[in-house]
Amino acid sequence: MEFALQKTLSSAEVKLIRQKLNLKQRELAEFVNVSVKTVEYWERNGGQVKGSAAALLCILRERTGILDEFQVPEKKLPVRLKYMYGEQLCTVIDVDDRTRQVRIKNFVTDPLFRAFGRTAEPTYEEYEEFLESRCFPPTRDKMKIILKELNLPFYDPFMIIQKTQGRMAEDNFWIQIER
């Protein structure tokens, strides 16, 4: 199979791509998952990019909107949850419990890996259901013993997730909470 991608990029081409994307060297390094020194080397006279990095830069040059698809939005609500599958960020969930606002951004296309499946604008009630789905059920046998082990005074899905990261025995999903 043949692909219409350059095999190597010159230092001038790399710099033009970065400028077209309106990125600093540090930001490009973060996106491409290399060090800032590597980007500096690529952009120095005589520097060359080859292999998978060249392919990724070629794609970025032609599809600049990809950056927006993967950019994590600025946190604007008091609580942020990152719904993860292993090390992959699947959904960012921003929440204001006081006003019952929920905003999400998905970073995966497969609904099975999204916190709310196909729902693009979940309600606060759906958010609460999601939290409960990442905990043991409130009707679980010996629940009081489990709560005591977690050092929790009562059943609260958010507090349980703070302690357990919403990890379940049967999957690789987990939740990182930022306040």
Image (cartoon, rainbow, N blue to C red):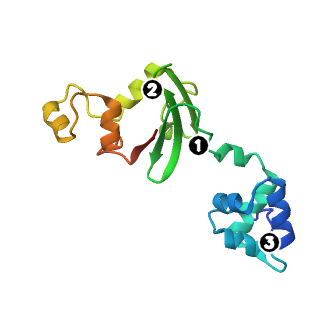
Left or right of residue 57, residue 125 in this image:
left
Tag nearer the camera, 3 or 1: 3
Mark 1 lies on a secondary structure that is loop
Q: Secondary structure at mark 3?
A: helix
Give whichever of 98, 86 is nearer the camera. Answer: 98
Q: Residues within 10 Å of mark 2 (few under 14, many from 20)?
A: some
In percent of width and height, residue 44 lies at 81, 76
2 vs 1, front mark: 2
- The answer to whether 91 appears left or right of 24 in the picture is left
Residue receiving disc 2: 127
Rendered-image quadrant of the N terminus: bottom right
Q: Amino acid at mark 2?
A: Tyr
- Judged from the image, the secondary structure of the residue bearing numbered disc 2 is helix
Look at discs 3 and 2 and give the one toward the viewer.
Answer: 3
Within 10 angstroms of label 1, few (less than 14), some, or many (20 or more) residues?
some
The residue singled out by tag 3 in the image is 43
Q: Which mark is residue 107?
A: 1
- Residue 60, position as x, y percentages in the image: 76, 55
Residue positioned 73% across, 63% down in the render: 25
Q: Are marks 3 and 1 in contact (CB under 8 Å)?
A: no
Expressed as whole percent of the image width and height from the top left, the position of residue 34 reads 63, 67
Residue type marked 1: Phe
First in sequence: mark 3 vs mark 1: 3
The CA distance from mark 2 to mark 1 is: 18 Å
Q: Which mark is residue 147?
A: none
Name the image quarter holding residue 130.
top left
Q: How many marks?
A: 3
Mark 3 to mark 2 CA distance (whole Å): 45 Å
**Looking at the image, is mark 2 or mark 1 earlier in the sequence?**
1
Q: Which three-letter amino acid code belongs to the residue tagged 3?
A: Glu
Can residue 138 be seen here? Answer: yes
Question: Which label's residue is closer to the chain start, 3 or 2?
Answer: 3
